[in-house]
Image (spheres, helix red, strand yellow):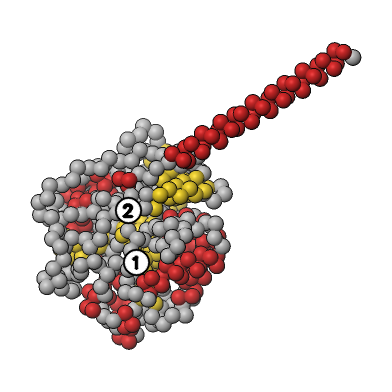
Amino acid sequence: MGLCCGLNFIFALLKRESSQLEIRVLREVQSQQNKEEKEFKCPIEQGNGNFADPVTCRRFYQCVDGFPYLNRCPSGLYFDDIQKYCTFKAEAKCGPLAATPTATTESPIDLARKCDQSECQLPYCYCNKDGTLIPKGLDPEETPQIILLTFDGAVNLNNYEHYRKVFNGKRKNPNGCDIKGTFFISHEYSNYQQIQTLANDGHEIAVETISLQMGLQDKGYEEWVGEMIGMRSILKHFSNVSANEVNGMRAPFLKPGRNTQYKVIEDFGFIYDSSISVPPSPIPVWPYTLDYKIPHECKSGTCPTKSFPGIWEVPLNAHFVESYEGGHCPYMDQCVLHNHDAEEVFAWLQEDFERYYYQNKAPYMMPFHTNWFQIKELEKGLHKFLDWTQTMPDIWFVTVTQALTWITDPKTNKQLGGYEPWNCKSKTTQTPKPCNISNKCALSFKEPTSNISDTRYMETCFDCPAVYPWLGDSHGSGIPGRDNYIDQSEGGPGSAASGRDQGEDEE
């Protein structure tokens, strides 16, 4: 009896000590977490944006004017410190990851001058002091409100049906034509039959590079050519999208490649870039040409400094509401709205949009990643917003190229009924109708920096290539370094006008 009581006493004592130890450990962990949270400081050199929580991949900080706001990813999602948004665990690259060092600034030779409106005239040039003026001095009441729906990254089964719901054939522009959008395509995991379908339906296809590699903003001319012109070649070869219809591009992570990227844009016949984000401003900025210095702060720190006459920049204005609820963001899915219901998301979008509609009618760009469509309340809120715009008589959903066509020769609302560039009576795309049953290709893939082979899957209406297309081999021939766009142009950098018609389109 005495032995039994003694053992019970010892067990009770051990249990109490174990509980106290657990409490102490928990307190230490909590103390450490609190310490980390309290010590987090926004990186001054990187400006506003989303940053990884050093403690857990389930949370992130949104820095607004130097103050960190702690946010949690939706259930089941993790913060990707490269893409800067919450995604599935298998896809997330947890941070904090070391930032790419900023390259040395270029010597102030041939720097772009401030806007001179006496010399800068439409249709070839457009600028004004702060970028907020309506082209040709149109009155806001006479100006159509353009909405630019843009989508970044791969097109595949994860997002294709979501995109089809946006462009459901029921939503129309005031002239009765279906609303349109612009897709900035990256290569990996893309379904080229679906891309061909989007192009055939009249949506614009643009490029966002092959690999979405980090640090591209610090790379040289050859790397930018390989990424941009290689992506354009892939679209031609596997989606039948003519190089002449690929007019624009967007840099990965909105990190423009300084003057180098824009030299490639100029040399290889692109019309516009859409990579430069604008800090929060009470009045949004209109697209402008790069004949002169950009009319706003360069948020990324890697904007062009030289003059690139006739090249259009279609900037990403920051999205925000007056209370700054949800923060501010260039991409819609980077604002923190996942805790909102559909009505609240709709109200947020409506308030953000009205800053454009009731002021200078600058194009309202709505840039999305797939991430937005993974959260039902965000998707429902977007559909409510799109349906609401259908009640407005002067709102037009057009592609980026269609918007720039209007900007070069502005027409009033009353003149748009028969405006040919926005009409749909005749087919505007050269992309043929896709096949009904695509080829499903399982292809060998090995990155140049890796010794490990992998398998990548790709769908196309064309024959499967020998290997997975990649940098230097956009046709997937299996011959490394097959692509040589610079040598195929007339004299290399600075004279690549033939790059659009010869090198890329050779079969």
Amino acid under disc 1: Pro
Q: Is 144 situated above or below 87?
A: below
Q: Could you tell me which residue is drawn at 15 percent across and 55 percent down?
A: 306
Observer-nearest of 429 and 307: 307
Q: Secondary structure at mark 1?
A: loop
Q: Is 110 situated above or below 220?
A: below
Counting labels gives 2
Whether residue 225 sits left or right of residue 48 in the image: it is left
Residue 254: assigned label: 2
Residue 221 in the image: x percent, y percent?
19, 47
Label 2, residues with CA under 10 Å away: few <14, some 14-19, many ≥20:
many
Whether residue 78 sits left or right of residue 241 in the image: it is right
**Which-is-in-front pick, marks 1 and 2?**
1
Instruction: Give the mark, 1 or 2, whose residue is nearer the N terminus.
Output: 2
Quadrant, the N terminus: top right
Amino acid under disc 2: Leu
Q: Could you tell me which residue is drawn at 56 percent across and 36 percent down?
A: 30
